[in-house]
Amino acid sequence: MTRLGMALIGLGPGSEPHLASLRALQDRVDLRWAVTRSDPAKAEGKVPAHTRLTNDIAQTLQDPEVQAVIVATPAHTHLAIASQALAAGKHTLVEKPLDVSLGKAEELVRLAAATDLRFGVVLQHRFRPGAVRLRELIASSSLGEIQAGVLQIPWWRSQAGYYDQPGRGSVARDGGGVLLTQAIHALDLFRSLVGVRDVLASRVRTTAIHRMETEDFAAALLTLANGAPGVLMATTAMYPGRAESLELVCARATASLVGGTLRVLYHDGRTEVVEGEDKSGSGDSIMDFSPAAHLALHRDFLDAIAEGRPPAVSGDEALQTHRVIDKIIAAGAFEPSISQP
């Protein structure tokens, strides 16, 4: 098999699971370039020995042997960098979110749609084995009709360890707080499984635990695609943080996906369990999780290129999740914190 020439743009913490996955895929991928904002010499050892390090994105995109690019830079750079990659004829995989605003996200998806290139978004929770099995059960109607859904993301990010870093929790750099930068993974999975027709009400605020421009707590009452009620709670203020949970009340069973582990309790007494990793980067160690889901997402992206089909998490899919997030924030009339610790 001919290996696909690839470049990784961005070598911050978010690049770690990508690098681990690309090492595992070295029979399919040739990581030719890695782009960093810092001194390239300081990044030596992070990438394979043959991978060239540079600060120059243009130099990377001019390489005719680079066929695909992963954009793992801060959210506010995604439209600018991904549009360069697409213009250079490179298949492009972008970290979540698409960009900091819905307008920029829509523009990026439009640009990608105007090409014959594959364009995907890194929302890897869909590829966890428990999530894959839950999707199968819903599609087969094995659980019965969904009666209600509850999604909780009780995460923790400390002020000193996370939000004191330049730009963290700001509109300019991140575009939003817990919803767009942390809960987006679980919310995207939830939306892709059960649909979100409407946001009936929400509360979106910054608690006194953090000093930040955007929200660290959100709660919402939702209407699912079939008209059933849904409930969301997402925060980065719940010390010390624990794995997100997605629970579905169905006519014939209750399904609970906690972290990566799925448990289905059927009304007839049967139980089905799909074991998975509980670690999800829910605490201050934001990269404390297995790269297995990234590996599955990368494989899907490579297969999409080979087969000429859209990736499982396309730009349109990510855009739908971004729109739900905007609706939650709009319904909640964002409340900045009045007091601080």
Image (cartoon, grey):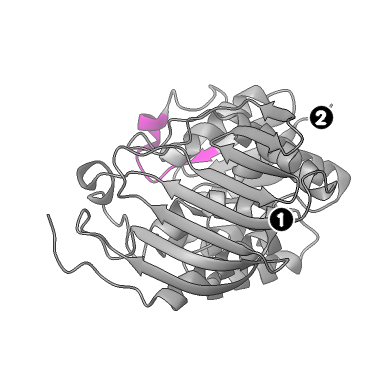
Residue 92 among those drawn in magenta? no
Taking 212 as reference, is 260 left or right? right
- The amino acid pointed to by label 2 is Thr
Of mark 2 and mark 1, the one earlier in the sequence is: 2
Image quadrant in which the N terminus is located:
top right
Q: Is residue 210 above or below residue 114?
A: above
Image quadrant in which the C terminus is located:
bottom left
What residue lies at 27% left-to-right and 51% top-to-bottom?
163
What residue lies at 43% left-to-right and 42% top-to-bottom?
36
Say the numbered circle drawn on residue 97.
Answer: none
* Residue 305: percent from left, percent from top: 80, 45
Taking 104 as reference, is 130 left or right? right
Among the 4 quarters of the image, the one containing residue 128: top right
- Mark 2 or 1: in front is 1
- What's the magenta region? 34-43
* Residue 94: percent from left, percent from top: 59, 52
Q: Which residue is mark 1?
A: 146
Q: Nearer the viewer, residue 304 or 202?
A: 202
